[in-house]
Image (tube, helix red, strand yellow):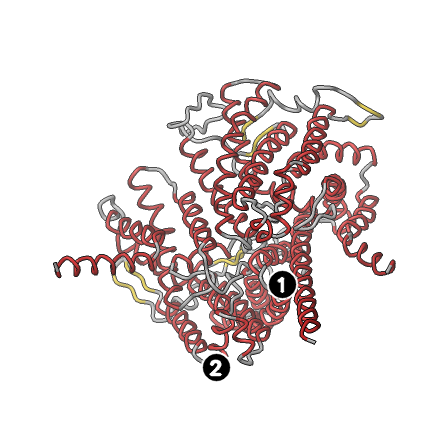
Amino acid sequence: MSEQTQKNAFNERIRNAAQEFGLPRLIITGFLVLLLVVSPFVGADLPTQISNIINRFSWNGVLVLAMVPMVHSGCGLNFGLPLGIISGLLGATLSIELGFTGAVSFVMAALLATPFALVLGTVYGWLLNKIKGGEMMIATYVGFSSVSLMCMMWLLLPYHSPNMVWGMAGKGLRTTISLEGYYTQALAKILQINIGNLMIPTGAILFFIVLAFAMWAFLHTKTGTAMTAVGSNPEFARSAGINVDKIRLISVVMSTWLAAIGILVYEQGFGFIQLYMAPFYMALPAVSAILIGGASVNKASIMNVIIGTILFQGIVTMTPTVMNNMIHLDMSEVIRIIVSNGMILYALTRKTEGTK
Amino acid sequence: MSKNSLGDYLRRFSVPIMFVIICVICAPISGLSPSYLINEIVTRMGRNAFLILSLLIPIMAGMGLNFSMTLGAMAGEIGLILVCDWQIVSIPGMVLAMIISIPISALLGLFCGKVLNMAKGREMITSYIISFFINGIYQLIVLYLMGPVIPIKHSTIKLPRGYGVRNTVSLLSMRQKLDNLIPLTIAGVKIPVATFLVVFVLCLVIIWFRKTKLGQDMRAVGQDMEVARDAGINVERTRIISMVLSTVLAGIGMIIYLQNMGNIATYSSHSQIGMFCIAALLVGGASVDKASIGNVFLGIVLFHTMFIVAPKAGTVITGDSMIGEYFRVFVSYAVITVALIMYETNKRKNKSKESQQLALEQENANG
């Protein structure tokens, strides 16, 4: 009898844990594990795969981390990430234009991107304070508008560096700019570990850890706690004497700045700056990564960022190789679209308290 | 009072007025002849009107701009691809494509309505993500299932690898068959009479629909969901119906659109259509919660004039053809952004006005 109840309680606990974890998340984790198990049998080299995932993680981690502050302050998922990315791109191109090379160009790009991120972030945050409740849709379109505005600017701004402009016309930036000689692998090369086929970009990961730790620490300061309070119950926060608008503004500026730094980290790993329409859909992978990691529209932790990025990037990198080796059919793009958008849909349809 | 209403008027029509100004400035610079412009606009009117009209019903039901109208567009494309493979040509082919698309769109609309009912208050962003999600499934079907599962015979449609559909499917057999059904040319302007007739019928249907019980219910739901529920209206069902209707209409609209274009860009025709239709509607003076048939037509004229004129004017001014291209994309997005911001600020203003009113009343009651 007691054994029976014990068993029931155990089942109950498992069910609760599964529920908390969420069915889609469970499926995605299961899928990734399956891919990892299958890959050696279909002839894919496991260490290469794993170092791919780690690499991709180091590229994208900061961009996903940029989601955290806005989710905390109740502004929802930052679909306006492209705005921050643009600040980063401005920093990157200016740094090259001013003639910095090597690892210094990375530091300068980050420094030059900061004022843009602060200004754009402030304007963006001010706007989002005007339209509480409709943040996500407007954020999406603010991102789109700014990307398409910058498309014109990349052509018109007076850039002259021969490494960046079109060779024939002598003006107008190229769609992709190689970072060879600038900051390719600037972070990744620091303390890089090579064991056979396994390659770990220690520097880039350390950079992410530092930022993530700073974020964690920030969320435990007075302002950070206030941010969480604003996100979970704005009315309560206001009556507790917190300046809700100011806190939200800070969160948006932080998110924008992190996006700017995030794209620089992405570029140092990827080796190229991508301009024009490239930042257009960059918000979606970051959004779905953090959601896959277990965040919801108004709740996100650093752990969600780490788990989410590993799972998402794992699927993105593993599916093509495994699928190709197995059935000579590359469905990875379609799977990526369905998984990432399905995940966002799932999160949007959850009933969440605190959102209006 | 009258001054106030003039100001309101100006604010309401600020977007159309801005567009009139852009068009008036750019049109002479572009150097395009008036007859060419008029011809283009009439063609585009026939091409887009049906699609944009499909957006009206969800707005009526208070669900905002239906970004998931692309679902219907995809259903329409699937219908056309199949009909093309069966080699049924001309008008019968179009009708058959519509008949095939209707159950698919209805099903997708049902799915969309159900999901949106779970995400009340976030309809627009959700419908936006739905369009991406279904696009993934559409690609799965068209790229992998068409061939092995859904039989495709003709190598002009199938990819050389043996499954999946080519990037472009030619609709030569259907090209402008509806537009040219009743040929009419006035002063050098070719008028697609039959297409306009279809659009006209749809306008009548929408006007009639507003007066039916269901149409009234939808408006009630759009005004206030809680009040409508208290009045005994099945809110969820009404919202789902509005989505189904919109998606089905969008599917038919897409077929009309593509018969004018003459070919399907299998993987990209639908992706931009939602954005351009919504931008055109907003340019016509519609807002997220209010849109009329007049907005649709004014919007098409203004938006597409800009669309034709901007790249040319951009080339003339800056000497770079890409500037104009980017400019019109930017304007499309900016219009939607501005409209969304105006809608949200108005909503908040009204809400605070209401709560002030409530506070005042309570004070009066107490005092």
| Mark 2 → mark 1, Cα distance in angstroms | 26 Å
**Residue B55: which numbered mark, if any?**
none
* Quadrant position of the N terminus of chain A in the picture: bottom left
Q: What is the quadrant of the C terminus of chain A in the image? A: bottom right
Q: For residue A222, which numbered disc appears in the image?
A: 2
Label 2 crowd bin: few (<14), some (14–19), many (20+), radius 10 Å: few
Between B159 and B347, which is closer to the camera in this rendering? B347
Instruction: Give the mark nearer the N terminus: 2 vs 1.
Output: 1
Task: Please provide percent x and percent y for residue B58.
Answer: 61, 43
Where does residue B363 sit, x and y in percent of width and height? 68, 73
Q: Of the residues shown, which amino acid type is indicated by label 2?
A: Lys
Residue on which disc 1 sits: A131
Nearer to us in this view, B244 or B48: B244
Name the residue located 38 percent from the left edge and 60 percent from the top edge. A293
In the drawing, does residue B54 fall left or right of residue A328?
right
Work out whether residue B77 or residue B330 is closer to the camera in this orientation and state it.
B77
| Circle 1: element type | loop
Q: Residues within 10 Å of mark 1 (few under 14, many from 20)?
A: some
Q: Secondary structure at mark 2?
A: helix
> Is A92 displayed left or right of A191 in the figure?
right
Amino acid type assigned to the residue bearing label 1 in the image: Ile
> Farthest residue toward the right?
B2
Query: Residue at image x 69%, y 60%?
Result: B346
